Amino acid sequence: MLLFLRHHGLALVASLLVHGGLIALLVFGPTTAQSPAPPKPVNIVQAQAIDADILRHRAEEQARKAEEEAKRLAEQQRIADEKRKAEEERQRKLEEKRRAEEDKRRQEEEARKKAEAEKRRKAEEEKKRQQEEAKKKAETERKKKLEEEKKKAAQKKAEEEESKKAELEAQKEKQEEDEAKEEKARQQEEERKRAAEEQRRQEEEEQRKLEEELARQMEEELHREAMRLEQERLEQEAAERALRERLLAEQQQELERRRLEMQKEYGAVIAMHTEQIKNAVRRNLRCAIDGQGLRSVIQVQLSAGGHVVNYKTIESSGNKALDRCREAAVAKTEALPTPSEDFLFEGYFRVFNLEFDGVD
């Protein structure tokens, strides 16, 4: 319901103004017409006669003005709706742009990470391959050298027994030195790998923190934008609500002013028909219950010919049986005396309150 009033508020007000104006014309009639001459005591009907052509002309003029006002308000509503739709379209495009940029950034980041991982994998594989080749080469050279030394030792075995023993000792020392060098190289390689892994972990941590900070900043920006849009929406709704309230208040003031003017001008006629209606209902009042001092009010709705079409008790006397009896009296009165002037009938007798003052 609130969404409907926000989108169609001005159109609703315009419609109310048009219908209110038509009702006011029918109910109260023109207010600037020359007052009729003071009624002559001998002919009340002639004193209240109104020129039908003048009334119709003024009614049509005021209806035309009300229709022009309604069109103006409808145009204002159309412009406001177009502005609102344009703003909604702008926000939708901004959201689509933000999502596209976010998807692009995420895809670029994923591609970058994938490329870096592939690069690291290839580097590791190349390094392992070179290490394997170096190890095989060293092993081949070592075996070759050992074989040569064995051949030399075999050739000199008979004549250089002591030299062979020294040679074997030297070989042993050299082998131990080579193994020590290999162990040292292995440890250095492991240390390098640990350092590289630690550096990679730190870089990933820094990247993660950077992404979290960017996401936080983006979320804060979106929140601020949402708060700004919500504030603008609330201010627009408040302005529209204030406008509707002001227009309705002005309309009610104008209707009340016209009603008071008409009541002042035709008060005698209204009072006369009111008393005739009370007398007509009293003639059909047959209550076995004493209603002395028990006041009640019945709201009555009439058709154009003065026939009762609906009624209900809006202020009870406190005695339900008495209320039903008075309602029955209204129902039995088939036609009530009403003024012949349409604007008086519509303004005061189409729907009116019939009071039973407790002295019926």
Image: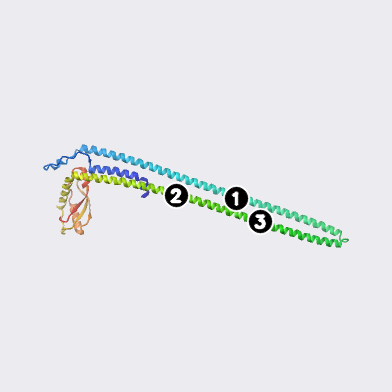
Disc 1 is placed on an element classified as helix
First-in-chain label (3 vs 1): 1
Q: Amino acid at mark 3?
A: Lys
Q: Amino acid at mark 2?
A: Ala
Residue receiving disc 3: 193
- Circle number at residue 184: none
First-in-chain label (1 vs 2): 1
Position of 60 compared to 128: left or right? left
Task: Please tell me whether residue 92 is drawn above or below residue 323 in the rendered image.
Answer: above
Tell whether label 2 touches label 1 (CB within 8 Å): no
Disc 2 is placed on an element classified as helix
Q: Amino acid at mark 1?
A: Lys
Decide which of 178, 282 is in the foreground and name it.
Answer: 178
Viewer can see residue 257 = yes
Disc 3 is placed on an element classified as helix
Q: Residue furthest left?
A: 42
Whole-percent x, y for residue 356 in the image: 18, 54
Q: Residues within 10 Å of mark 2 (few under 14, many from 20)?
A: few
Residue receiving disc 1: 114
Residue receiving disc 2: 226
Viewer can see residue 304 = no
Colour treatment of the image: rainbow
Q: Residues within 10 Å of mark 3 (few under 14, many from 20)?
A: few
How far apart, in angstroms, are the residues tagged by discs 1 and 2? 35 Å
